[in-house]
Each structure stands twice: as C-alpha cells, then as structure tokens.
Image (spheres, rainbow, N blue to C red):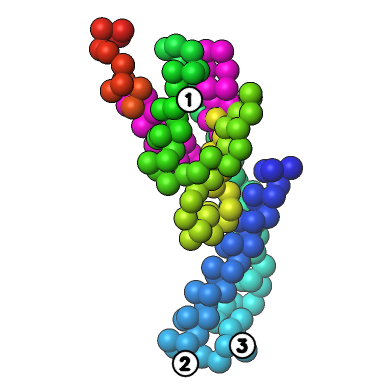
C-alpha cells in the first residue's frame, strides 16, 4: 500500500511540475494559457501522461530501500550515536519503541520537497539494524553512523 501511495504522489508531483513549466513557457512565449495544449501535437498529452505514469510506478522502487547496519556490539552502543547522527542531519525523533525508531525532517520545506516521504526508520535487531527510507538519505546516514561509532570507540577493537 505504501508503494501505491508513493507512486500516486509522484504522478501528481510530475503532473503539477509539468503544468508549472508549461505555464512559464506560455508566459515567456506570450502564448495564451487557456490553449496551452496547442503547444503539443495532437495525442501528445496522452503520451506524456503515460510516460509520467511509468516513471511514477518505477521511481518508488528505485528511490526507496531498506539498508542495514551491521552491529559490532549491542544496540545500546549505537542508540545515542544514531540519535546524534540524525540530529546533526536535521532529523527529529518522531517515535520510538522496542522495535523501531522513526525520524522525520525538521525543516518544513525539506518535507514539502520530498512530498512528506522523508521518514527514516531504524528497525532494531540482534546483530543488525535495518534502515528504511529514501536511498539518498539512508546511504549517507548509515555512513555517518559508522563514522561516528568508529570515532567514539578505540581502534584496537578492529
């Protein structure tokens, strides 16, 4: 269900972005906004809509995934490091229980640009922590967690 919601959000996002760009072009070219469809060949609007639908259906599969952090010790060693790393990256703890920690962007405009698909979830495990969210964020944040863990623990453990 989450996948379908993301796909619909991205379809709407692409359509709105397309309309804004075409409106700007109409204003620059002094073309009447009421007949902006005349800028395109007949039948091109359906082709554009199909292209947006395909991209919207594929993007959630490519833009979101679940990564993992392999733990060198108990999760309690990582808990504070994860919280500090997320705080440094402008994420706030939204909820936490025995199974997961959910963080969201602090900045409203960042949440808006990501269509409120900005949640980073840490699923706690015995020897691994799974991190679910946008690939661009999870990859960077996992790297930062590893770096912060290594900088706070002596090198002779490695």
Q: Which residues are magenta?
A: 123-147
Q: Which residue is mark 2?
A: 30
Q: Left or right of 153: which side holds 8? A: right
Q: Earlier in the sequence, mark 3 or mark 2?
A: 2
Q: Report the front residue among 122 and 93.
A: 93
Q: Quadrant of residue 103?
A: top right
Instruction: Single out the mark in the foreground, 2 or 1.
Output: 1
Q: Report the front residue among 143 and 101.
A: 101
Rounded to the nearest whole Å, what is the CA distance between mark 3 and mark 2? Answer: 12 Å
Q: Which residue is mark 1?
A: 79
Rounded to the nearest whole Å, what is the CA distance between mark 2 and mark 1? Answer: 58 Å
Residue ranking furthest to the right: 1
Question: Is there a contact, CB below 8 Å, between mark 1 and mark 3?
Answer: no
Asked which secondary structure carries label 1, the reply is helix
When the figure is inspected, residue 30 is found, relative to residue 53, above or below; the finding is below
Rounded to the nearest whole Å, what is the CA distance between mark 1 and mark 3? Answer: 57 Å
Residue 130 coordinates in the image, percent (x, y):
54, 25
Instruction: Single out the mark in the foreground, 1 or 3.
Output: 1
When the figure is inspected, residue 18 is found, relative to residue 102, above or below; the finding is below
Q: Which residue is mark 3?
A: 35
Residue 91 visible in this rendered orientation of the protein: yes
């Amino acid at each position: 269900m989450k996948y379908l919601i993301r796909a619909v959000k991205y379809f709407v996002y692409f359509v709105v972005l397309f309309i804004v760009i075409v409106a700007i072009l109409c204003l620059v070219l002094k073309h009447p906004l009421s007949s902006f469809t005349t800028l395109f060949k007949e039948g091109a609007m359906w082709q554009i809509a199909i292209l947006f639908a395909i991209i919207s259906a594929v993007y959630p599969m490519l833009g979101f995934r679940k990564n993992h952090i392999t733990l060198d010790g108990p999760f309690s060693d990582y808990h504070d490091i994860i919280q500090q790393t997320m705080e440094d990256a402008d994420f706030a703890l939204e909820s936490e229980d025995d199974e997961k920690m959910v963080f969201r962007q602090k900045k409203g405009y960042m949440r808006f640009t990501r269509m409120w698909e900005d949640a980073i979830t840490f699923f706690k495990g015995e020897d691994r922590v799974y991190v679910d969210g946008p690939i661009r964020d999870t990859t960077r944040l996992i790297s930062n967690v590893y770096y912060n863990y290594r900088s706070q623990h002596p090198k002779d453990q490695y």
